[in-house]
Amino acid sequence: MTVGHADYQGDVNIGFFGIVTEETVLLAEGFKKSEFFGDSQDIRLAGTDLIGIFAAGNSNGVLVPEVITEHEEEVLEEKGIDFKVLETDYTALGNLVLCNDNGCFISKNLEDRKEEISEFLDVPVESGTVAGLDIPGSCGAATENGVLLHRNASETELRKVEEALQAEGDVGTVNFGSPYVHSGVLADSEDLLVGNDTTGPEVQRIQESLDLL
């Protein structure tokens, strides 16, 4: 297992600029650590580099919002990325969806798309909050075997997410105290990339939570 620190053009919130699954790595154009996870695809979404804000997914595919352009859809198709445009008023899907290849935990704002998400990602879907916030995607990071949640997530919330994703986990922070762990983590079952401000103790907690030791 490999661990590294990175930023994106000086921004330590690397989770904003990519998504990593067991099958697919999508990163903003110019990500200096794009080789970290092996083969990666450099893209833009909604005319921005904010891949991790707008997209979420697992090995079965990637959910993207209606605000992506026709050209961006063509690029995803050309790169062989299996994607689904989710018709919803909520465009920041990366903030609302936390998933792995075992399950998915979504914001209650996406309840009306629950069956659609489940069918596309081919996993069971549950909904709820993390740390009392209706943005589980922002408040969590997950691999196949582990999950890390916002430091203020309750025991009940942690158990619900663990059950949904069929993975054990814990709470923690990234980038010297940020509780929005999605913002500072890119990980699969073999590699972990964290924001440059993430401390040694934080890395240890992230590794333990994501079962990457």
Image: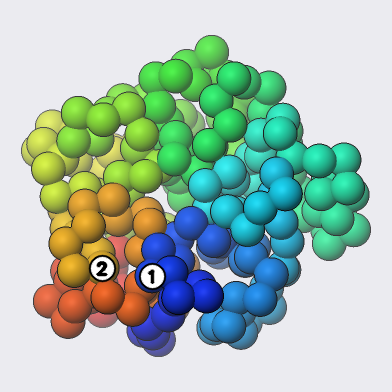
Q: Please tell me whether residue 174 is drawn above or below residue 68 in the rendered image.
A: below
Three-letter residue code for mark 2:
Asn
Residue 141 numbered mark, or none:
none
Instruction: Note whether 47 is above or below 118 in the view shown.
Output: below
From the top left corner, tell me how far across and down residue 153 is, in percent: 15, 40
SS type, badge 2: loop
For the question of whether residue 65 can be seen, the reply is yes
Residue 4 in the image: above or below residue 55 = below
Q: Position of residue 70 (x, y in %)?
A: 87, 40
The image position of residue 84, as x and y in percent, is 72, 36
Q: CA distance from mark 2 to mark 1?
A: 7 Å
Mark 2 vs 1: CB contact within 8 A: yes
Dot 2 or dot 1: first in sequence order is 1
Q: Does 77 appear above or below 117?
A: below
Q: Residue 42: which quarter of the image?
A: bottom right
Residue annotated with mark 2: 175
Residue 12, disc: 1
On the rendered image, what quadrant is the C terminus found in? Answer: bottom left
Of residues 67 and 187, the one nearer the viewer is 67
Label 1 residue SS: loop
Location of residue 73 by image quarter: top right
